[in-house]
Image: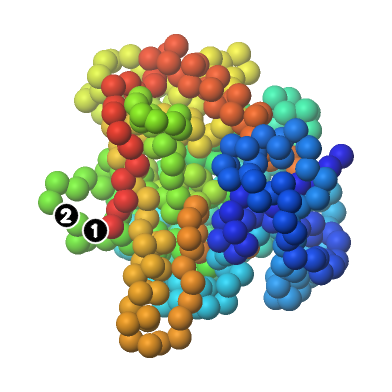
Amino acid sequence: MVKILSGAGTPLQNKHHRIHATKPLAPQSACTSGPFAQLRTLKMRRNLALTALLVTTCASKDVPLWMQAILDSRPHLKTVKGAHVHRSQYPEDPALKAAGALLAKPPVRNPVVVALTTTPTRVAAVEPAVRSLLNQSQPALIVVSIPDVYNNRRSHWNGKRIEPPAWLAQLDAAARSTKGPCAPCVVVANPAHDYGPATKLVGAVEALRSDPALLAKAGDDREKAIVVAADDDHEWEPFALATLLHVGFSSSKPVGYDATKTVWTYYSYFYPRGRPIKDSVCVAQAGDMLAAPLSLFGELERSAAGVLYSSLLRHRRDSLPRRWGRELLPGGRLPSCFFVDDLFFAAYAAYSRATVYAHPWRRWLFREAKRRKRTGEPAFKPCAQGGCSPKTMQLRYPDGLAHGAVRDRHSTNCRSELEALGWWTRGGVGDPCLLGDF
């Protein structure tokens, strides 16, 4: 099988290299001229990659020594066959990383809950991701949702059960034995159902609703609580969480801004893509953090008795109770959305009339670069395009849903399923994604 080692774009700008974590890295030669020079569109490159017609690729730089040292220190990662580093300009450009640290913002006062989930394949290797969230300047309660049983919607799960590894069980016990707020701390939730990747948010909301004392571990003000979805294959710079939340949930905001109806992320895009933009939703990627008020998720989950908080339904378009999360389960009416949680949450946010804001992080970096050019301070090269989230490291695992034709098919089917339920917001014209540069 041919492995494609690079994506679109120029080195260290939009090029994401797949470097296997289990093998030492040898230097590669520079790119040569040839058919690659003619591939000017992302669509052409993607089609060639998906059909495995490319036998070789442009060279990539070696993994930096600091990154290789981290990988070498993680024996559990080496047991996950097919795990590899997802390469990007941030944080591998030291000057860019240093500039980003200077743009960090202080924490917000709201109670913050970070929602994660994992799989039987990854659970042995997620400790660094969890520790990076514990190490944030923004104190947070981290809820790791592990279903009682993983369903067989993906063949590599096969109805498995997993027990939390010792380090995770110890963190959970310490948090639960603490009276009152304990953030930063970690608890394990065990939802009865497997909602796929959406388990991160559905499981956390379910746990917070069924156990009011759990939210108190993040803070006492439930009305101002924020839930942040994150992926288990990302490790974050210590200021990432506070910097994301500061723009959307600190006190100083423009007139008319309603934080209770917002979603914030470091990277977003509209779907379906194409021009003209019509009937699209803004997809906030959980991989780049997805933050929203807890109150926004009133229709995401309901108890086993099927009872939603009636106060959350009073101002909806109709009085029919919703059950978004439960439609992801086997026999539900959103079987394709099970695989594309980002699109599922995007449709949910649009239906709830929430506005999705992209954090101006990349714009901040451009402004800082221009300022340094004017003043003659040491220069750095900001991210040219695509995501530029303040990550310490990003990994890829073999049980992830690959980009390309498979994901496109699930996304198309998911939209059709949502339309059949009347849950796809129609009528919008223009890009639904806004830049939150207040």
Q: Position of residue 295 (x, y in %)?
A: 33, 39
Q: Can residue 371 be seen by looking at this rendering?
A: yes
* Position of the N terminus by quadrant: top right
Where does residue 405 sit, x and y in percent of width and height?
65, 29
Q: Describe residue 243's horizontal placement relative to residue 53 as left or right.
A: left
- Circle 2 SS class: loop
Badge 2 crowding class, 10 Å Cα cut-off, few under 14, some 14 to 19, many 20 or more, is few
Q: Residue at x 59, y 25 (%)?
A: 410
Along the viewing direction, whichever of 64 and 186 lies nearer the viewer: 64
Which residue appears at 33% of the width and 78% of the height? 371
| Above or below for 33 versus 279 | below
**Tag 1: residue type?**
Phe
In which quadrant is the C terminus drawn? Answer: bottom left
Residue 42: give x, y in percent of width and height.
58, 42
Identify residue type, mark 2.
Answer: Pro
Residue under the point 84% across and 42% down: 2
Q: Nearer the viewer, residue 412 or 54?
A: 54
Between marks 2 and 1, how big is the CA–CA gap? 7 Å
Report x, y in % for residue 199. Answer: 57, 36
Determine whether the residue tagged by mark 1 lies in a helix, strand or loop.
loop
Residue on which the image places disc 1:
438
Q: Disc 2 designates what residue?
A: 254
Looking at the image, residue 213 sits to the left or right of residue 397; the answer is left
Residue 303 visible in the displayed image: no
Label 1, residues with CA under 10 Å away: few <14, some 14-19, many ≥20? few
The answer to whether marks 2 and 1 mark residues whose Cβ atoms lie closer than 8 Å is: yes
Give whichever of 129, 361 is nearer the camera. Answer: 361
As drawn, the label of residue 139 is none
Which image quadrant for residue 392? bottom right
Question: On the rendered structure, is 288 left or right of 296?
Answer: right
